[in-house]
Image (spheres, rainbow, N blue to C red):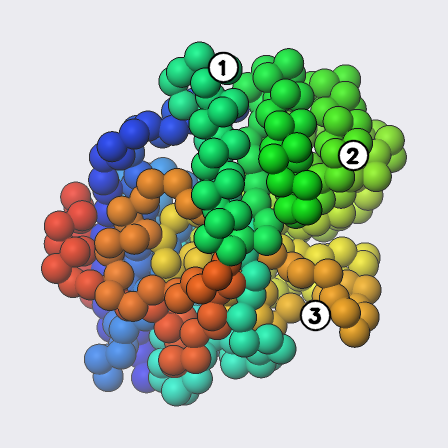
Amino acid sequence: MKIASIKTHHVKCELETPFGFSQWFYGQRNVLLVEITTDTGVTGWGECYGPAEVIQTAVDRFYAPKIIGMNPTSTDQIWHFMWRASLDFARGGVLMAAMSGIDMALWDLKGKIRGVSVSELMGGAVRDSVPCYATGMYFQEMPEDLLLKTLVEEALYYADQGFEAMKIKVGKNVAFDEKLILAMREAMPNMVLAADSNHAYDLPEAVHIAKVLEDNNYAWFEEPLSPENLDQFTHLQNQTRVAIATGECEQTRFGFSKLIESKGVQIIQADLAYCGGPSEALKIRALASAKGLNMIPHVWGTQLNLAVATHFLATAYHEPGRKEEKSLFLEYDRTENPLRDELFEVNVNVVNGKAIVPSEPGLGVSINRDALQQFSVNSTEAK
Ligand code: MG
């Protein structure tokens, strides 16, 4: 069996209500999808995290012509072939995002060819469902008093839907962040809560916010600092009991090896649409496990990334392991995203805050071709 064609689809939509985080506001969603078809007519899908137009060129012009004709089930062989093809000038960045989407599509394809789910390919599911945490509480353009009230109401809505865990955004300004952290804990005394600054703080600010999170029993502090300053992570983690989480900006086992060695991180958050794909994510998980750490993916985008992360967590063994495990929560973005909610005819089924692990061959989600046509702004095909 051979790879016969590689298509890319840049899908895009405008949002009704722009939402913000510590760095800027989103007014639209853009994703690059990768569709790989074999000479026997089997099709697999993947997605890439990052600037869709740029990654589209990388998949279509750079990688696709090199791997067409290869055996699609030789995922590690193809990964290392692509890695060597771009190693001299791109050990990461958007080219690695391109490789990630290709690799994800190959895992979907391999599952379909073998007639088994991606979790079966990853070693077998050890759970039928994965508890989710709701990602939301993004900033909106309104006065801070009203914003505080609006964000607490949003969180209570997720609690009503059955979520046992959720993550808020911080990093607007330290005074507001502190009020928000306290208001959330006051509104939900028993909720598993986490906070994400998207690398907004300097070290003194991060130390201060970590103390507030610690005093309010938050489960983790995500991207407190710039991903470039690993020594600051070490310093911060040494001063707080709150678990430091990071990794959505990092890629490959080589990048994560440095992150893990810093001893400044407790939760490793590689994104399977960016870190190098499912093939590389399994290697990163092994590295994390060797240091007693859990790898819990960052998830953003469409049903494809949600599905692959569900399979990944379905097959995860908790570090250090015990009979009554602490949950490894799946990130479930709850912000407006028609590309997640309207583009697929089969979605990951989330019931009462738990994602049911798909049992169909491959990733177990499928694209609606009419919706694809509607959302697509540019498609390519390499043969
Ligand atoms: Mg994050």
Inspect this view and state whether residue 233 appears.
no
* Tags 3 and 1 touching, CB below 8 Å: no
Q: Nearer the viewer, residue 14 or 355?
A: 355
Point out residue 258 in the picture as x, y percentages from the top left corner: 73, 45
Secondary structure of residue under mark 3:
loop
Mark closer to the chain start, 3 or 1: 1
Tell me the distance, in whole angstroms, between the alpha carbons under discs 1 and 2.
24 Å
Q: Quadrant of the N terminus?
A: bottom left
- Up-down relation of residue 177 to residue 320 (above or below): above
Determine the residue positioned at 48% across, 49% down.
160
Q: Position of residue 285 (x, y in %)?
A: 66, 61
* Quadrant into which the C terminus falls: bottom left
Which disc, if any, is residue 317?
Answer: 3
Instruction: Please tell me the numbered disc located at residue 370.
Output: none
Q: Which residue is mark 2?
A: 214
| Res. 102 image quadrant | bottom left
Residue at (59% x, 53% y) in the render: 164
Residue with the most extreme right position: 238
Q: Residues within 10 Å of mark 2 (few under 14, many from 20)?
A: some
Q: Residue 323: name its quadrant.
A: bottom right
Query: Rounded to the nearest whole Å, what is the CA distance between mark 3 and mark 2?
Result: 26 Å
Mark 1 lies on residue? 144
